[in-house]
Amino acid sequence: MNYKAIQDEVIAKYRIDLCNGTRCKDGDWSRTHAHVKQRRVCKWKRANSVQSTFTLFHEIGHIETTKSYMRRAESEYYATIWAIEKFKEYGLMVPQKTLEDYQWYIDDEIARGKRRGGTGYGKLNLVEAI
């Protein structure tokens, strides 16, 4: 499978600016992340792999779906759903372990929000959504 060709296509289609992290002004980011307003994905490790492709799609999902009123768990959930849907469009399968990892992260963000007094979190379950 030529994942790099798919990555290039999606980067061009969604007008994504890639950055190695040198243009980040929000401190020392240590992992892949997106700057929504700039349509920029930073510190993404390009590889001809399903994982690298999903990570890219997830970050583009943030750019395409994040709204200012969303809480972190919601932002992560909708970005992941977007990535899953794009994988389907390209006939790709998301590894079960990847789904489990992202669900764990979403659940962790919900728990953090609740510890900080947040309420009203709906069901943010990836398996039920797909």
Image: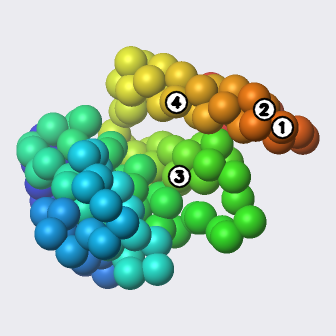
Picture residue at 20% right of the left edge, 55% below the top: 43
Q: Which residue is mark 4?
A: 105
Mark 4 touches mark 2? (CB < 8 Å): no
**Could you tell me which secondary element the residue under label 4 belongs to?**
helix
Residue 122 visible in the shown view: no
**Residue denoted by label 2:** 114
Looking at the image, residue 56 sits to the left or right of residue 21; the answer is right
- Between the residue at mark 1 and the residue at mark 2, the CA separation in whole angstroms equals 5 Å
Quarter placement of the N terminus = top left
Q: Residue tagged by mark 1?
A: 117
> Where in the figure is residue 29, as x and y percent of width and height?
28, 53
**How far, Cα to Cα, is label 3 from label 2?**
21 Å
In this rendering, the label closer to the viewer, 3 or 2: 2
Q: Which residue is mark 3?
A: 79
Proximity of marks 4 and 3: CB atoms separated by less than 8 Å: no
Q: Secondary structure at mark 2?
A: helix
| Amino acid of disc 1 | Gly
